Amino acid sequence: MTAAEFQTLSHTLPTQAGIYKYYGEDGELLYVGKAKNLRKRVSSYFVKNHDNFKTRKLVDTIHHFEFTIVDSEQDAFLLENALIKQFRPKYNIDLKDDKTYPFIVIKHEPFPRVFLTRRYIKDGSEYLGPFTSVQRVRELLEVIKYNIPLRTCNLNLSEQNIKKGKFKVCLEYHLGNCKGPCEGLQTLEDYREELQQVKDILRGNLSPVLNQFKTQMQEHSMNLEFEKAEIMRKKIESLQEYQVRSTIVSTRIGHVDVFSILTDGEHAYVNYLRVLHGTISDTKTVTLEKKLEESDEEVLAYAVAYLREVFNSRCKEIVLPFPIEFPEEDVTITIPKGGDKKKLLDLSIKNVNYFKDELHRKKILHLEGKSDMERKKVLYQLQADLELVELPTHIECFDNSNFQGAYPVSACVVFKEGVASKKDYRHFNIKTVQGINDFASMTEVVHRRYSRLLAEQQPLPQLVIIDGGKGQLGAAMESIRNLGLIGSMTVIGLAKNEEEIFFPGDKDSIKLPFDSESLKLIRRIRDEVHRFGITFHRLKRSKGTFKNELESIKGIGESTATQLLKTFRSVAKVKALTLDELTTEVGAAKAKLVFEHFHPTNNASKDA
């Protein structure tokens, strides 16, 4: 659908809240979105020039659209999430979570059984959960079995069957794990009271159960039933030990949902902490793939809605790192600045960072677990896709890194036989380039790397990847030419945003299939050079080995430079100071050196 074709239809769009659906020519659902004003939102796709490649591609692919008017923003929000979850359109956020979670079911039957299940059957039974850990569910069931005697048999304990005396008590009765409802030794009312205790334990509300056990222990003691009192004491100790093992934040907090987010390029990671009665009862981290450069606010809002639905959360308070549009009624969004809720948010952030690092480590090791044949298959595919003369068994990748436009460094990672060869990684402090110049820095490090390999008669890679577009590729090729290495290896540039691949001298780029093994390997190498470069950069900063411009002034040492930066926060602000202001801070002699460094023309005119 072109912009002109859309203009003929735009007046038919309503201005109310609702959802819209974009379809391709073959009827495939491409995208679902929500809007406060349908006409304004849908029009924005066709009248604006979009910077993002995927958004442009979506608009070019739209054949027709449909919309649904709803009563409120909340309805639009809920309907959008339901449709995305049901149809998983190509251009919507993709939340990668295909697991089935365990529940604890209280079966709909006379004298209900309590057990673990992964099947949610609408038969009137009560399901508690879901839980993220089967181990945790089994621990809970052990706690329940030890403290609350419930039947585990699958007998049909109807009132008629019990009256007819069809059943006899089993070993569980004699062990004290069941009160024998099969022979009518326990009433349904008494059984229901114990089921309520089970529900309290499963919901993390142990206080009523503990209070009831303490009351029963006192009654047994007063009646001189010391053996029964001792049993209740042990049960109280058991529940208190379980309570201690749970992560208790603060009983004052009550029920809250805590979410944090970490973004990394096209992926985002969201952690969820479920807090009941001030205790962390569950935690879950999910990965989301962004398709149209969605903001952190949009991604987090989608993840919050998804996870609250999956885990049946009815908490009226959500703790977040920043505000989002979440129009669910009677729900409060809290952005904590301190206190217990801030501690919870920090814990969630710690969890999401750990998850991302673990995922990255596994991704880097992705090919390590494969056989030689599988690794070779990926390399042969890469050779075919890039039309390489040789099989790329040795690949190197370069990337530049700087901090807020300062302190440039570069990194090189090496992959051999499709896996990282960390002993061959190299990092570079830029030596010949003044200021920030990515192109000149790339020229320098590529020349240093391959002049060294030539001098040491080391083998050259079959494929070199330059992380950047045509500019960085051209800068790298300058060194390759000067070293006489044209034709000795293939050099390509990888555009940062759209994963386009450039060859030297070619006007147009090529794009590998998004899910191809070749592009996945290139992405892994690109991500690894980013990680290695950033880690080196942080290490250098933490050691204080970067010198700022003030320290380069003859006669100005590290302590004076640090003093000026602490007071005025940046070199730019120091540069703007008058001679008198500098003198007040560091004294006349040093002030003169600093002022003359930044104002050489002023000094020259005075001398004249």
Image (cartoon, helix red, strand yellow):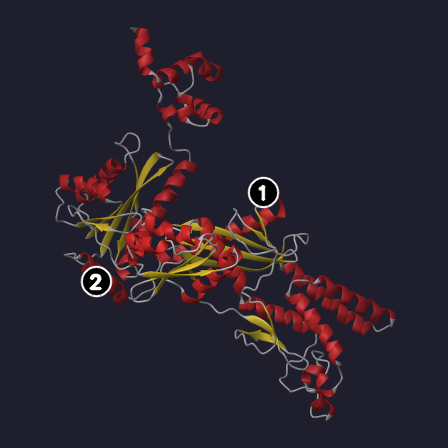
Decide: marks 2, 1 in contact (CB < 8 A)? no
What residue is rendered at 34% in x and 16% in y? 599
Mark 2 or mark 1, earlier in chain: 1
In the rendered view, does 375 fall on the left or right side of 160?
left
Q: Where, by quadrant of the figure, is residue 181 drawn?
A: bottom right
Observer-nearest of 396 and 45: 45
Residue at 74% from the left image edge and 91% from the top image edge: 163
**Residue 449: in sight, yes or no?**
no
Residue 401 image position (x, y, % from top left): 33, 40
User: Among all residues in the image, which is located at the extreme top?
Assistant: 608
Q: Quick one: 175 or 44, which is closer to the camera?
A: 44
Element type where label 1 sits in the image: loop
Q: Nearer the viewer, mark 2 or mark 1?
A: 1
Residue 393: x percent and y percent? 22, 57
Q: Kindly tell me whether residue 69 is visible in this rendering.
A: yes
Name the residue that disc number 2 marks.
Answer: 380
Residue 300 in the image, given as x and y percentages of width and height: 48, 53
Residue at mark 2 to residue at mark 1: CA–CA distance: 53 Å
Identify residue type, mark 2: Tyr
Q: Residues within 10 Å of mark 2 (few under 14, many from 20)?
A: some
Q: Is residue 570 above or below residue 182?
A: above
Q: Which mark is residue 337?
A: 1
